[in-house]
Image (tube, helix red, strand yellow):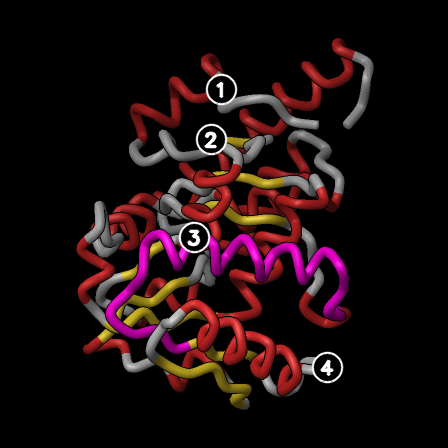
């Protein structure tokens, strides 16, 4: 985070104006990549700022469709919970390490850690696992299935850690490393736990498990909040009100 208040304010102003433009361009059927380039170039955004928009701002139809499928309250506990393992693990680790977190206009909390290709289980990872299982012991689902991305290093070992913790917590289910987790999620019969866009679009019900874990132990510091950016009217108001602090 930059300690210069005026510089932070200027960057926030640029980011939230760019977010509004990015939203409106998508909502007018501009291709997503072109819309991001146009908004980013107009406000001279750096690569991390463009990544914030990429992960945080979607057209109204997409955002509202995902929000409509979000499982609210405790109803998710009555179903199989299919967890996108690395997605939840890495997001909770980002919370622990104080990395940038954003709240997207589709309702999900995401980081921009970019850790997938170089993920390694660490002491921070062990703390994240403990937090996840402390939450699940207090709010146990009927069954839980953790699916980890097998091509990532040590996925089998991480699945074994989760199986051991499930046994100790008395949770029914399994943890496995599979080639493509989203292809193994039984969408019609489960609540999917992920903030991954492909999972949210493919599923019929989802929860932001990492977000719930963070809220339980946090709350998390949300550096950029785009949750109100869901209509053209809101987009016109958004740059004036801002969406929260940014760096």
Q: Which of marks 4 and 1 is in front?
A: 4
In the rendered view, tell whether residue 3 sits above or below residue 217: above
Residue 136, position as x, y percentages in the image: 39, 58
Label annotation for residue 78: none
Quadrant for residue 145, please give it. Answer: bottom left
Q: Check disc 2 and report the residue beneath it.
A: 20
SS for callout 4: loop
Quadrant where the C terminus lies?
top right
Q: Give the range drawn in magenta.
A: 119-145
The residue depicted at 39 percent of the width and 21 percent of the height is: 236
Q: Residues within 10 Å of mark 1 (few under 14, many from 20)?
A: some
Q: Residues within 10 Å of mark 3 (few under 14, many from 20)?
A: some
Q: Check disc 3 and report the residue beneath it.
A: 135
Q: Which of marks 3 and 2 is in front?
A: 3
Label annotation for residue 239: 1
Residue at mark 3 to residue at mark 2: CA–CA distance: 35 Å
Q: Earlier in the sequence, mark 2 or mark 1?
A: 2
Q: Which of marks 3 and 2 is nearer the N terminus?
A: 2
In contact (CB < 8 Å): disc 2 and disc 1: yes
The residue depicted at 63 percent of the width and 77 percent of the height is: 158
Q: Which of marks 2 and 4 is in front?
A: 4
């Amino acid at each position: 985070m930059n300690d210069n208040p005026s510089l932070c304010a200027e960057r926030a102003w640029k980011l939230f104006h760019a977010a509004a433009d990015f939203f409106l361009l998508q909502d007018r059927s501009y291709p997503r990549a072109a819309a991001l380039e146009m908004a980013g170039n107009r406000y001279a955004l750096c690569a991390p700022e463009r990544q914030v928009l990429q992960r945080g701002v979607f057209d109204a139809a997409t955002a509202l469709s995902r929000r409509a499928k979000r499982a609210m309250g405790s109803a998710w506990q009555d179903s199989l919970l299919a967890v996108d393992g690395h997605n939840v693990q890495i997001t909770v680790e980002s919370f622990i390490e104080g990395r940038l977190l954003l709240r997207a206009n589709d309702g999900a909390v995401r980081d921009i850690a970019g850790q997938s290709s170089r993920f390694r289980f660490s002491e921070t990872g062990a703390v994240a696992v403990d937090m996840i299982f402390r939450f699940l012991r207090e709010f146990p689902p009927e069954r839980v299935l953790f699916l980890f991305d097998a091509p990532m290093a040590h996925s089998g070992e991480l699945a074994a850690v989760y199986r051991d913790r499930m046994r100790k917590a008395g949770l029914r289910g399994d943890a496995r490393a599979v080639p493509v987790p989203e292809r193994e999620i039984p969408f019609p019969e489960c609540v999917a736990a992920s903030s991954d866009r492909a999972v949210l679009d493919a599923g019929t019900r989802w929860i932001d498990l990492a977000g719930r874990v963070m809220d339980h132990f946090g709350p998390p510091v949300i550096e950029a909040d785009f949750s109100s950016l869901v209509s053209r009217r809101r987009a016109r108001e958004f740059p004036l009100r801002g969406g929260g602090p940014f760096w």
